[in-house]
Image (spheres, rainbow, N blue to C red):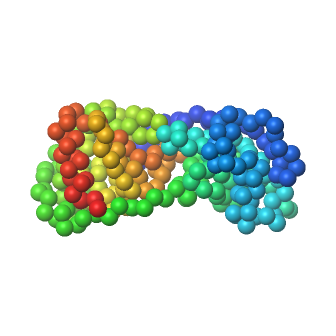
Amino acid sequence: MEFMVMLFLAPIIGGIIGLIVRKKVLKKLNPEVEGFLNKRGTTLESELQKFIDSQNLNEKVLTARMSSIYKYKNNECTCIIVKFKIEGKSDWYAGIVSDSGTYTDLKKFNLMTSIQDTNILLQKIYKQPTREINEDCLIYLPKLENIYHFRIQPDEKVIFNSKINNVRIDNNLSIGRNAKLTMTDKRIFIFNGVGLWTIELYNDISDYKREESYLEIALSEICIFGQAGERICTGFKFFFDNTEELDKFENILNNIIQ
């Protein structure tokens, strides 16, 4: 999954809240954190302890605190940004507790870049199975003209072209109206007039589904973008100008994705 132009800034969601593992637990938490913990049937203290245990840091961590919270993936998931200190070190280090898992790469914690750093951590643990492609079907699909002049390889053939009324990503954020879409036997190209997105058929698609007015493709890995890597994309919703084009796009996917 690639994106070639930096577009958006995302606000930091949540305030700074803290606790020290096994020493002091806050009596009042942000409602979003309480919802996250209730859904998991756990407490913040136990989540932080589980984070320490899962990263084999039990003998090293002196203090662990919840720095802030961050919503991602259509506002359905909450990520707790953790900062912790290691024995013998004066710096704080960054980690995450999320619906996708817990993780740290022992990078120093920086409040100013915590969202970007969190997205990088999420990308390392957010992986969905990739759907298989029916290569026999791709071979027999007719070759079309590359009417939007995307840069394709000599052995790559165009199998679908269309204008798109709108393309939306997480939180239903629109990334471009009247975009141009070309699908080849290797990739899907989307140009919104500002930046070019590409979806690799064999590596990037974990699932797809048709709704009444759009078709949604879910990505196998998080795509990070933005001026400082502060935004993420876990999938695309394609809104076509007419039902006929939407039907054609769905029919191709139904045939080539197993």
Q: Is residue 145 visible?
A: yes
Q: Quadrant of residue 67?
A: top right
Pinpoint residue 121: horizontal percent, then vertical percent.
59, 54
Q: Quadrant of the C terminus?
A: bottom left
**Left or right relative to 49: residue 99:** left
Q: Quadrant of the N terminus?
A: bottom left
Of residues 209 and 223, the one nearer the viewer is: 209
Q: Identify the residue shown where x is 69% and y is 39%.
A: 34
Of residues 78 and 159, the one nearer the viewer is: 78
Q: Identify the residue shown where x is 19% and y is 40%.
A: 245
> Is 228 situated above or below 57?
above
Q: How many marks?
A: 0
Q: Identify the residue shown where x is 64% and y is 58%.
A: 103
Q: Quadrant of residue 203?
A: bottom left
Pinpoint residue 54: horizontal percent, then vertical percent.
69, 63
**Left or right relative to 93: residue 127:** left
> Is 65 situated above or below 105?
above
> Is 68 situated above or below 255?
above
**Left or right relative to 136: residue 191:** right
Pinpoint residue 177: horizontal percent, then vertical percent.
32, 32
Of residues 194 and 122, the one nearer the viewer is: 122
Q: Is residue 117 visible?
A: no
Q: Quadrant of residue 68?
A: top right
Pinpoint residue 145: horizontal percent, then vertical percent.
13, 50
Q: Identify the residue shown where x is 25% and y is 53%.
A: 253
Residue projecting furthest to the right: 23
